[in-house]
Amino acid sequence: MLEDGTYDVVVIDADDVEGGVHVELTVLAGPHKGEVVALTAAGLARDPLDLLAAPGTLTVADGVPRLALEG
């Protein structure tokens, strides 16, 4: 996982899984540019196909990621 901070990301893959949506994100800038981060997000209430290429912000605080997608 990334260290604490805020990262601009884009969704490169998304699939329904039990308990949420498994998403793979690519970091767009900074020292971690190009790194892929995978996590399961709950409460997105969107079809996984609609998430593909969606930009967002990944915030990591105390090692816990929080994803906010645009749109």
Image (cartoon, grey):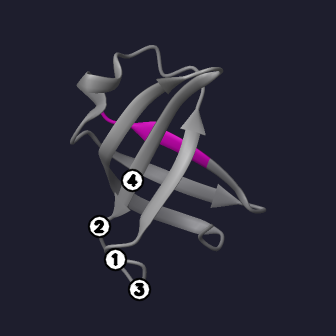
- Dividing the picture into quadrants, the one containing residue 69 is top left
| Span of residues in magenta | 66-71
Front: mark 2 or 4:
4
Please, is residue 44 above or below residue 6 in the view?
above
Please, is residue 1 above or below residue 68 in the view?
below
Name the amino acid, label 2: Leu
Does the magenta run of residues contain 28? no
Taking 4 as reference, is 59 left or right?
Answer: left
Instruction: Read off the residue under disc 3.
Output: 31
Counting from the top left corner in percent of width and height, residue 62 is at 78, 62
Q: Classify mark 2: helix, strand or loop.
A: loop
CA gap, disc 3 to disc 1? 6 Å
CA gap, disc 2 to disc 4? 9 Å
Residue at 58% in and 38% down: 40
Please, is residue 69 above or below residue 19 in the view?
below
Residue 36 visible somewhere in the drawing: yes
Instruction: Read off the residue under disc 4.
Output: 25
Of residue 40 and residue 70, the one placed in the foreground of this image is: 40
Name the amino acid, label 3: Pro
CA gap, disc 2 to disc 3? 10 Å
CA gap, disc 1 to disc 4? 11 Å
CA gap, disc 1 to disc 2? 5 Å
**Quadrant (top left, top right, bottom left, bottom right) of the C terminus:** top left
N-term mark: 1 or 4: 4
Taking 22 as reference, is 28 left or right?
Answer: left
Instruction: Read off the residue under disc 1.
Output: 33
Q: Classify mark 1: helix, strand or loop.
A: loop
Of residue 16 and residue 8, the one placed in the foreground of this image is: 16
Q: Where residue 28 is drawn, which disc sits there?
A: 2
